Every structure is written in C-alpha cells, then in structure tokens.
Amino acid sequence: MKNLKDIRLLFVEDELLMQKSIEKILAKHVTEFRLAVNGEEGLKMHGEMKPDIIVTDLDMPVMNGIQMISAIRKTDTETPIIIITAFEDQAEVAKGADFSLIKPILKKKLFELLELCVEKLN
C-alpha cells in the first residue's frame, strides 16, 4: 500500500511564488517532487517520470492546464489530478481532473486531497 511518502508528484504551475511555496510544503513529504512551468512541459514530464499524482494550475502560457489534462487523459486515465484555480467556475470546466482546489491554497485542504489521491491509488 502506498502512502504519501512513496509518491512521485508532478506540480505544474507558472507563478514563481506559488512554485516556491508548494515545493516548500510538499517536497519533503513525497519521494520525488518535479516542477513544470506550463502544460507543455508538464505533459513532457508526465511521459518521462510517470507521476503518481499531478497537481496543476489551469491558467498558464504555452499550454493551459485543461489542454494538458485532456492530452494526458488520452493515454492515462488512472493518475489522480488535482487542479488549482483562482476561479470556482473553472473548477467545473476541468474535465478529467479528480479534485479541485480554489486559491488561496490551504495547506490542510491540499494534504486532504493528496491523501484522497493516495487512497485512489491503493
């Protein structure tokens, strides 16, 4: 059975402040933490690292989170995906995501969703 410490996590986010704060929170709690700065890079990293969980922003340059999720779901329907968005209406738009988290991110809520993702993997 997997737990959070066994997880390879891919975080896709273009905002530097958010990148740093989430990395600081999560990197010490997972086996591997990788960061992509847009959906295109996230899609590439997904293919390379085969993450257990993906956490992604929706509004990013080059390829947005919705486009990335759609591309991932064509070949991978199992990996849990958590979207992070500033807008509640976007959370409903992101088909293919398992969970949504509205900014500002509460650490407790993020860990609750990650634990739900781990349960889904087991």
Image (cartoon, helix red, strand yellow):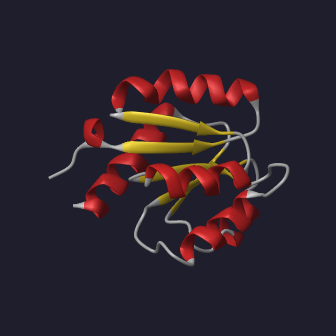
Vertical comparison of 13 with 97: above or below? above
Direction from residue 37 to residue 117 in the image, left or right? left
The total number of labels drawn is 0
**The furthest residue to the bottom:** 74
- For image coordinates 71% across by 65% down, the residue present is 66
The picture quadrant where one finds residue 19 is: top right
Residue 45 locus on image (x, y percent): 57, 49
Direction from residue 83 to residue 7 in the image, left or right? left
- For image coordinates 47% across by 41% down, the residue present is 110
Vertical comparison of 26 with 9: above or below? above
**The furthest residue to the front:** 48
**The furthest residue to the right:** 61
The picture quadrant where one finds residue 58 is: bottom right
- For image coordinates 29% across by 40% down, the residue present is 4
Query: Which quadrant: the C terminus?
Result: bottom left
Residue 18 locus on image (x, y percent): 68, 30
Q: Nearer the viewer, residue 107 or 49?
A: 49
Vertical comparison of 22 with 72: above or below? above
Direction from residue 80 to residue 4 in the image, left or right? left
Vertical comparison of 116 with 89: above or below? above
- For image coordinates 79% across by 57% down, the residue present is 63
**The furthest residue to the left:** 1
Residue 9 locus on image (x, y percent): 44, 43
Residue 112 locus on image (x, y percent): 38, 45
